[in-house]
Image (tube, grey):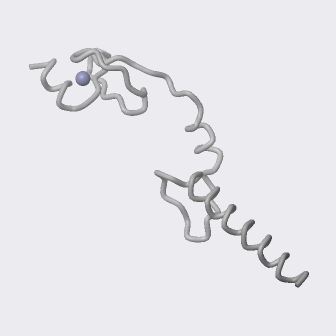
């Protein structure tokens, strides 16, 4: 009976660890064993990202998704870059 309790606890820990791993590796390429050498990079990604404004439509979005033209203007998409420069 004692072992059954420990088995349940062990299973709960395993399930919890897998969920934690999944949420940490979501959206990024992960190695099959769950150990990711780029863990530090992901930590940074979770922090608040710099928001920029599209020069065409005015929407705010993360700087990492921005498209910049030759004159330094920031756009939300290639489409808006094209529309603004035409
Ligand atoms: Zn836009």
Q: Is residue 14 above or below residue 24?
A: below
Q: Looking at the picture, does residue 81 appear above or below residue 11? A: above
For the point 29% across and 27% down, the residue is 76
At a point 57% along the width and 58% down the height, the residue shown is 22
Q: Residue at x 19, y 25 (%)?
A: 80
Q: Quick check: 8 left or right of 59?
A: right
Q: Quadrant of the C terminus?
A: top left
User: On the rendering, which quadrant does ligand 1 occupy?
Assistant: top left
Image coordinates of residue 11 in percent, x first then y, are 73, 73
Question: Does residue 81 appear left or right of residue 42 in this picture?
Answer: left
Quarter where residue 84 is shown = top left
Percent x, y of residue 25 = 55, 54
Residue pictured at 42% horizontal, 28% vertical: 62
Query: Which is more toward the observer, 12 or 1?
Result: 1
Left or right: where does residue 31 sit relative to residue 27? right
* Residue 32, image x, y percentages: 55, 70
Residue 6 position within the rendered picture, expressed as x and y whole percent measured from the top left: 85, 76
Name of the residue lying farthest toward the left: 86
């Amino acid at each position: 009976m004692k072992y059954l309790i420990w088995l349940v606890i062990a299973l709960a820990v395993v399930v919890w660890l897998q969920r934690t791993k999944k949420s940490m590796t979501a959206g990024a390429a992960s190695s099959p064993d769950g150990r990711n050498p780029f863990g530090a990079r992901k930590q940074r990604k979770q922090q608040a990202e710099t928001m920029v404004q599209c020069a065409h439509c005015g929407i705010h979005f993360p700087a990492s998704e921005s498209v910049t033209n030759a004159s330094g203007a920031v756009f939300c998409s290639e489409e808006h870059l094209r529309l603004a420069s035409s």
